[in-house]
Amino acid sequence: MTGQLAFVESPVQLLNVLEWAHTQAPSQGAPRTAPTGAPGSADATPPPGAPGPADATPPTGAPGSADATPPTGAPGPADATPPLTVVVLSPTDPMSRGQLRRMAQLARDEGVTVHWQEARGGRGALVRTLRELARPLRSAERVIIGDPFSRYVQLLLTLFGPRHLTVVDDGTATMEFADQIGRGERLVRWHRKGNLGPRELVLAPVTSLARRRLAPARGRTVEIFTSLPVEAPEGIEVTENSFAWTRTRFGPPRLTGGADLVGTSLVETGVVDAGHYDRVVAELARAHGATRYFAHRRESAEKLHRIAVETGLQVVRPELPLELIARRGPVGRTIVSFPSTVVHTLPLALAGTGVKVAVCEIAPEWLRESASPRAQGFLSGVAGTAAHEVDRLTTRVSTPTDRLGFG
C-alpha cells in the first residue's frame, strides 16, 4: 500500500472517495455504465461463493484482501498517479457492512485496490490494525479520510504526519468539522453534548494531536472535498464534489408517480422525539402521495416496522448510498427528506432528471430534552443552506391533530 491511501468506515465515505478519485483522472477514458447484472445494477447478484454482505472476510488473494492486485489495465480512478488504495475500517452493524461490501465491489470495478480491515473484530483487533497499517501510513504521499471525528481515524493520525491530507464528506458533519478546525476548537460531533465523559477524557490527548494533524502546517496541505456549503478555513483548500462519477456511471433513472420519503436516524441518536417523528412521516406520506420510505442504515427495525404498519409505506433498506439508488432508479418525481446530507447531494446526483427534492425542517418542539443545545441551530443550518432548487416545507406538527404547513 503506497501512493494514496484512503480510510473509510461508511458506504457514503467510499462513494465520495470514488468521486474524489474521478476528479484526479479527468482523462480516464469514455464513461462506463454498470452492465446488467453488474454490482450496482438493478438486477445484480453476487457471484457464486462470494463473501456475504454482513460478516464474511475475503479469502487471501481475493479482491479486497491485503495481497490482492487490481486487474491489468483496469480503467477508472486507479489510473491516477500515484495509485489509490482504499482501506475499509469495517464497522460492526450488518447494514453498514453490507452496503460497504457492495461499494467495495464498485470500487474494484473501477480498478481501485480495496483492503478490507476487520478493525473492530474482537480482542486484539486494534493492535493488529495499527501494526498492519503503520508502515503504509508513513509511506503514503496522500491520505484521504472520510470521518475526521472517528476515534479510530484520529488514533491512526497520531502515528504519522501526512504530507497531503484530504477529507471527504461523511454527511453534514463536514460542515461542523470545517467550522471547528477553522476556529481551532475541539472536534465534537454536533449531536453530542459538550461535557467530556470518562472515555473522552482518556482520549483527549489523541484528539488534540489528531486535530493538529488535520490542520494545515509547514510541509502539509489539507483539502476538503465536499458537496456541502463549506466556508474554507484559513490555509485549507475546498474542492467541490459535483457527483460527476455518479452521473457518469448510472442513470438517468426512470421516474415513477408520487413521492419517496428519506428516513433519518435523528431518533436513534437521541435528537428527535420518536412520537413527533412518526406523526410527521405519516403527514408527509399523505400530503405528497408517497409510497416508499428509504430507511437510513442506522434506523432501528422496531421503528421501521411501526412506520410500515401505521402509514402503509413500503420500507426500503437501500443496498447502496441513496445517491446511487436514486440515480439508478426507478425513483419518485419528488423526494422528501429531513435535514440531512441528501438535500445537498441528491440535487447534484439527479441534475437534469426532473426529480424535485424537498426538505422538511425540524421544529424545536420535536427535540428531546436530552438533545445537544447545538442541535436546533445545526439542523436549521443544514436545511437553510440547501440548494436553491430544493423546496422547503415549514412544519407545525406538535400534537397528533396538528398538520404540516408548506412555505
Image (cartoon, rainbow, N blue to C red):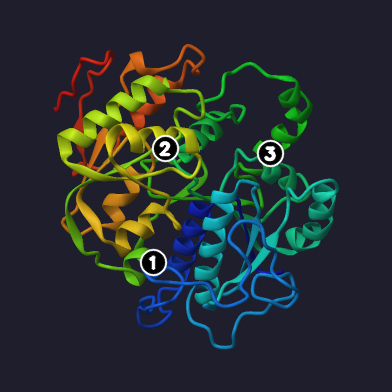
Return the residue found at the far front. Answer: 309
Pinpoint residue 241: horizontal percent, then vertical percent. 39, 55
3D distance between C-alphas at marks 2 and 3? 29 Å
Q: Is residue 177 left or right of residue 387?
A: right
Pinpoint residue 202: horizontal percent, then vertical percent. 79, 26
Instruction: Say which amino acid is labelled 1.
Output: Trp
In the rendered image, the vertical position of residue 165 relative to residue 84, given as above or below:
above
Q: Nearer the viewer, mark 2 or mark 3?
A: 2
Q: Nearer the viewer, mark 2 or mark 1?
A: 2
Q: Residues within 10 Å of mark 3 (few under 14, many from 20)?
A: some
Q: Visible in this render: residue 346?
A: yes
Q: Which residue is mark 1?
A: 245
**What residue is at 52 percent from the left and 44 percent from the top?**
235
Return the residue found at the far bottom. Answer: 72
- Labels 2 and 3: the sequence-earlier one: 3
| Element under disc 1 | helix
Q: Nearer the viewer, residue 126 or 256?
A: 256
Instruction: Say which amino acid is labelled 2.
Output: Leu
Q: Which residue is mark 3?
A: 151
3D distance between C-alphas at marks 2 and 1? 31 Å
Q: How many marks?
A: 3
- Labels 1 and 3: the sequence-earlier one: 3
Q: Which residue is mark 2?
A: 304
